[in-house]
Image (cartoon, rainbow, N blue to C red):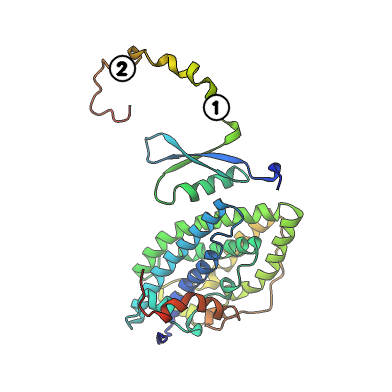
Amino acid sequence: MQASIELDRRADVQYLLRIGDTCLILAQRLGEWCGHAPALEEDIAMTNMALDLVGQARALLTRAGQIEGRAHDEDQLAFLRDERDYFNATLVELPRGDFAFSVLRNAMVATLLKLLWERLATSSDEEVAAIAGKAVKEARYHQQHSADWVVRLGDGTAESNARMNAALKELWRFVPELFASDAVDEEARASGLGPAWSELRETWFAEMGSVLEEATLAVPAESAFLSTGKRGVHSEHMGYILAEMQHLQRAYPGGVW
Amino acid sequence: MTTEQEWPLWEVFVRSKAGLDHKHCGSLHAPDPQMALQMARDVYTRRQEGVSVWVVRSDQIVASDPGDKTMYFDPAEDKVYRHPTFYELPKSVDHM
């Protein structure tokens, strides 16, 4: 079996992996809808989105590996890290739930990523800026498509509204983590690598607020619970998703198509 | 599921590049115009097939009856003089 790689947990690497891993893990969750979405058209839309996110993750993991300087490539970073070395927001590792849960999570994450990419387009790291310039177009579409679903289901039937409300109640607990600041954030902000996520808080709430209002859903009160995925401390779901993602590379080291 | 609860059918037209016509490329089910447009984008343009998309509700299209085929189209068969075969097209005209 292939052993785990030893990651240099320096702040700039962690900052990029937070974004890259958030894309990577959400892509894995979205991929679970392949063949299971409520309609063929939406099946394709969700897996398209998953592939966009894989593309964004690949670019960021590659760049993080270069900055780290231990010759780790995108595949090693994607498949050979231990759980504590993944820095995605906890939100994206939660099981996919029903369709309401998935589209609401997509809207929340796409809104965050769009705001991040917009700011990263002027990153002091030229490579990151170039990745962001391309990714922001994808994120804008993801945000529009998933927000449109949130509105249709929230402002739909009694059943769809009830499911959206249940999803909102569950997912909103994981929002505080997104905008909690720490040393990794501060260092990125200071060096110009990218914004502290806390800087995006106000705009994110404004954009999500207007989507939820149109969807006739009330914005829940802010939760006191603070999840910690971005610091590498994950929910009980993370081990299972990594086992599924990693087992092929672990069992057949360096295996390719 | 009854027929009334199913999403309506839409016909999708894609323009492959600026200056060309929108061409019919298929159909899909979607709940409303906005979603139909987004799904057309996802289903029919993910390999760079297009720069513009139209969607039209299939039930809004008025189609000729296949039974009328002979009456409608056969009479044109022996009227070659309707083709502009006696004109030379300038080289710069690409799409006639």
Question: Which percent across, then down, holds residue B3?
Answer: 69, 42
Rounded to the nearest angstrom, the CA distance separating label 2 from label 1 is 27 Å
Quarter placement of the C terminus of chain B? top left
Q: Is residue A167 above or below residue A161?
A: below
Question: Which percent across, then down, holds residue A224?
Answer: 69, 78
Which SS class for mark 2? Answer: loop
Which SS class for mark 1? Answer: loop
First along the sequence among labels 2 and 1 = 1
Residue A43 located left or right of residue A8: right
Question: Which percent across, then down, holds residue A134?
Answer: 40, 59
User: How would you rate the neighbour count of disc 2 (Cα within 10 Å): few for under 14, some for 14-19, many for 20 or more?
Assistant: few
Residue at the extreme right of the image, as rendered: A158
- Residue at which label 2 appears: B84
Question: Which percent across, then down, holds residue B36?
Answer: 56, 45
Residue A99 visible in the picture: yes
User: How would you rate the neighbour count of disc 1 (Cα within 10 Å): few for under 14, some for 14-19, many for 20 or more?
Assistant: few
Specify the amino acid type for callout 2.
Answer: Pro
Camera-nearest residue between A233 and A253 = A253
The answer for which chain carries disc 1 is B
Residue A15 located left or right of residue A152: left
The answer for which chain carries disc 2 is B
Q: Is residue A57 above or below residue B72?
A: below
Specify the amino acid type for callout 1.
Answer: Ala
